[in-house]
Image (cartoon, rainbow, N blue to C red):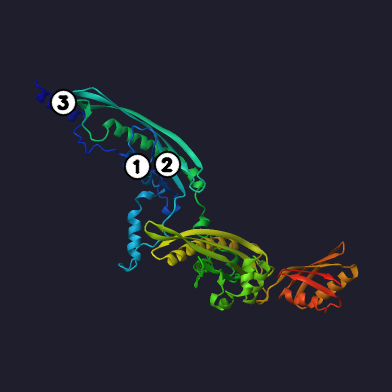
Amino acid sequence: MNNKIRLLFMIAIAFHVFKGETMGQRKTKVEAAPVTCENVPRDQRPRIRVTGFDITRTTAQNVFGKELGSMLANSLNKTGCFNVLESIGKLGGAMDEMKLNQSGVTDGSGPETGRMKGAQLIVTGEVTEFKENKIGALAVGVNQAHIGFIIRIVDPQTAEVLWSESVERKVTKPGLKIFNADITSFGTQAMEDALEKSITDAVGLVVGQKELIESYKVSQSDSAPKYDRTTCPVNMSGSGPSVMVVIPEIHITRRVPDPAGETEIIKTLINAGFRVIDPSVYKAIRDGEELGNAIRNQDAAAASRIGAKFGADIIIFGEAFSESTGIQNGMQSCRARVEARAVSTYNAQIIGADGRHAGGTDNSELVAGKAALRNAGSQMGVYFVNTLCEAQGIKKSSGGTGESSSEIVLGNATYTNAGKVETYLKAFKGVKSVTKNFSGGVVRYSVTHTGSLDNIAAALDSGKSGLTILITSADGAKIEGNFN
């Protein structure tokens, strides 16, 4: 038999061994991974992102790591257990569509920036074994494949490796060898089978950690309120507390005229059934000194008095800023932070306080800043809805006058003078209660009152109590002075 006939004979044998499969047909079958989580609503699945595998074993090409990552992502998506996000390196098409939507060429109905979901957990891999042995020449030989990798689940917030496991497969398959070269252009049937089995193994391992993944899932409070107008306890009577929200915003060095973060907080509160005072009512004080001082000093008592003037039971006050972070993927990018606290205008009690930051992109820097402020404000709105709905004993203000708890400290005091001032304070208009503590020549009064504490300070300083008192400081929640 001459060499030409021998070659044709070996090719025929090879096609018989491969059962008629062509090179294009011999693909890994991981796309057919079985569904393992049935009827789980998409919004209840944890969000994961699968990265391309790192290559430790130098015999494997770098492109191979990307292919493994894509195969694993595809298989995990088919399980129905997770919301699998597109890999970061493949978001170019989505970003281009957003740019087109903002360019004015379309009618604006395309995708908006700032709406992409972030991964709650990352699935990573590292190829540690990759070996193919091709045994035989000028005959139907044997192909041996060995694939091994480490798979990890990582918390992207802390970079903690929550779980890791090794996956390893060895497969031996018959294969055609011609001059010690395999007929396939990429790997062998043995390697394809090893990949299929190892990816199937990896999918089973990750799905087996679903309980762990669920426990690390970003809490519901970070994305949507726990309550609405029908379930919020403080609003179920139909006469819940009224809320005033005032959070001035700055982008770099310029004041933002229509605060986006504040608007998002108001919208979220209204959706939960809270009565929110129209910002136009207190527009005049937004840039005023009184509010500015309350915000800069984080003065809960001063803020509560401002809220009480406008009939609010709760005032949410704070500040927000945004700034450019440069060009990202061809678009302007900004970061923003919103910080605020909720205070009862009845007694100046702080009900909740928090700060959130977020990003935003757009063709325009100012619009990107607005988007970032809106996203941070949305998170704060969720926080305040959950906090206020779960708060106990929120008291309503008295017709918009409000009550505050303040302290008066006077030095050089005698027991007799301390008692006279106590009697005077109890008779002062708007004072609800007075508690005295006298020790070492210093008297301290805890005073619950309506109206401004400045009125009490002025009365004491002018001698209306019948005693000479020099007031040295009055900061809105505390008066300090000395008997002369």
Residue 455 percent coordinates (x, y): 74, 77
Q: Are marks 2 and 3 in contact (CB under 8 Å)?
A: no
Question: For this view, does 170 lie left or right of residue 359?
Answer: left
Give the number of the disc on residue 124. 2
Question: For this view, does 21 lie left or right of residue 131?
Answer: left
The residue that disc 3 covers is 10
For the residues labelled 2 and 3, the Cα–Cα distance comes to 42 Å
Quadrant containing the N terminus in the rendered view: top left
Which residue is painted at 38% across and 60% down in the image? 331
Q: Earlier in the sequence, mark 2 or mark 3?
A: 3
The residue that disc 1 covers is 66
Tell me the kind of residue under disc 1.
Lys
Give the number of the disc on residue 388. none
The answer to whether residue 28 of the structure is visible from this angle is: yes
- Which one is in front, 70 or 242? 70
At mark 2, the secondary structure is strand
Tell me the kind of residue under disc 3.
Met
Which residue is painted at 32% across and 36% down in the image? 61
Residue 388 percent coordinates (x, y): 60, 63
Q: Are marks 2 and 1 in contact (CB under 8 Å)?
A: no
Q: Earlier in the sequence, mark 1 or mark 3?
A: 3
Tell me the kind of residue under disc 2.
Thr
Residue 387 percent coordinates (x, y): 59, 61
At mark 1, the secondary structure is helix
- Frontmost of labels 2 and 3 is 2
Q: Earlier in the sequence, mark 2 or mark 1?
A: 1
